[in-house]
Amino acid sequence: MGGEAKPGRGIKSWAQRHLNTGFAAGFLLVLLTYLVVSQQFAVTAPNAVTTKGSRVVDKQVIGAAGDAGLEKKRDQEWQPKAAAAEEPDKKDTSGAVPTQESPKRDDADAKPFETDGDKVVCNTDGPVSETCDLDGDVRTNGSALSVTFVPSSPSERREWRIRPYSRRTMAGVDKVTVAQLESPQDPAAPPCAVTHDMPAVLFALGGLTGNYWHDFSDVLVPLFAASRRYGGDVLFLVSNIQPWWLGKYEAVVRRLSRYDAVDLDRDAQVRCFRHLTVGLRLHKELSIVPELSPGGHRLTMGDFTAFLRETYALPRAAPVSLAREPGRKPRLMLIQRPHYRRFENVPGIRKAAEAAGFEVTVASPRADAPLGETARAVNSHDVLLGVHGAGLTNAVFLPPGGVVIQVVPYGKLERMARADFGEPVADMGLRYLEYSVAVEESSLLEMLGPEHPVIKDPEAVHRSGWDKVAEYYLGKQDVRIDVGRFAPTLAQALDHLRQQR
């Protein structure tokens, strides 16, 4: 149509006359751009880093439960422990880990970048967690989920992407960008709105929180390891904040930090610190590795349980001594789960335990019960007995020297059971005993019949993938303990208590 203008003859002649000159200049410009971009990419890409492995708070964010989905989430007493390897920035929605994996331990050595007293140590290759420790001029922008490190002298620009939840592949938890600038005068440095004297720990909730075991293993234990050295003089910056969670564990959080937690995602102010830890480091499941404690402050799982006893004013730091009080009966708490993996013969188990010499309490812990109430009830006992599940997390409240008996459901789950509870219980200073359910004691035998692959070949079920393991051995199984076969385990627990002085 006639609306399109065509180039005139003069313009065409001008282009022809300057073609060679323009081509040469363009080539040089492209070459120069390539060299600059290549150099910058080399120093900003996360993989280029060699690693292994108060504002015055306007409102209190530690409050009562208010999440509409909380009750459903709390009812999910079992959830998978970690996600598999994840592609960069791709969220894994499975949340599953093969049960035959060896227990994970995050002991990768991150190498620090230091200059003139500044220090940045980022661990992005650890098998479980991602963390950064920054000393110097550190500035946070919560609403942008960014941390900026301003060096005191010229340095390379570096950048990391850290998921501040203790499991690095956890879906639904946003990453934080940690950037180290090139110089103190770098225009990218955001101006400080508030400058803090205390250090800070930045971490995320969400993920698998809401499951009692994960609340401790994924958050409370790593948070204790990260912050206990400050004696309460530390500020918590919380991404994906869950007010109900902070309410439930308020006593613990309050003893670790004397300040109100900051809702990071809604915090528009730039906060400046001299020291900041980004992310929580999970040493191993529900436990602490002393050698991995930050700042040279060696901590143990025994330190964590002692901290809980102080927090909730629990009276007992030792079980009953049958040597000193031979006529006294030790107390055994039997945990009866509200759904799958229940004991089908609680009266029979209770009678056998009483015959062995125990005073028995049957408990079904409520998700909405105040944690202090649960802690005091468990601490008044000497032995905790239960089928593998979140209820055994209450071992953290037992007096040291007590006993935990874990009943492992049928299906070759012993390795997972020991990683989740066996090793942690030993680290707490408790005696760990294990009773593996035989096929005749499992409800799956009657449900599926003796020829079903789930009954005949558990190893093949494990090889088929985590989904079937979780569906059958964890999600559809109850147990009927053979009390005669179980009697030696009860006798072992009693013998251990007889040796207590």
Image (tube, rainbow, N blue to C red):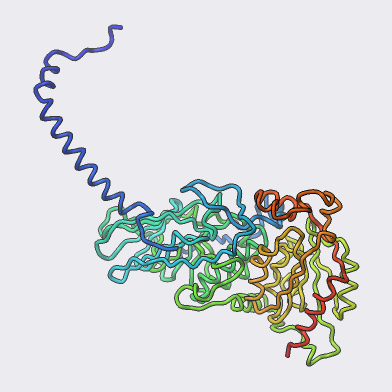
Residue 343, quarter of the rendered image: bottom right
Viewer-closest of 125 and 163: 125
Task: Report the side of 237 relative to 301 (left or right).
Answer: left
Residue 296, quarter of the rendered image: bottom left
Quadrant housing the C terminus:
bottom right
Residue at the far left in the pictured view: 17
Q: Position of residue 61 (x, y in %)?
A: 57, 60
* Vertical side of 352 occupied by 439: above or below: above
Q: Position of residue 80 (x, y in %)?
A: 64, 55
Q: Position of residue 113 (x, y in %)?
A: 33, 65
Task: Report the side of 304 relative to 486 (left or right).
Answer: left
Quadrant housing the N terminus:
top left
Residue at x-position 78% and y-position 87%: 498
Residue at x-position 52% and y-position 60%: 128
* Vertical side of 280 occupied by 79: above or below: above
Viewer-closest of 216 and 103: 103
Q: How many marks?
A: 0
Residue at the far bottom in the pictured view: 324
Q: Position of residue 137 (x, y in %)?
A: 34, 65
Task: Report the side of 20 relative to 83 (left or right).
Answer: left
Residue at x-position 65% and y-position 79%: 429
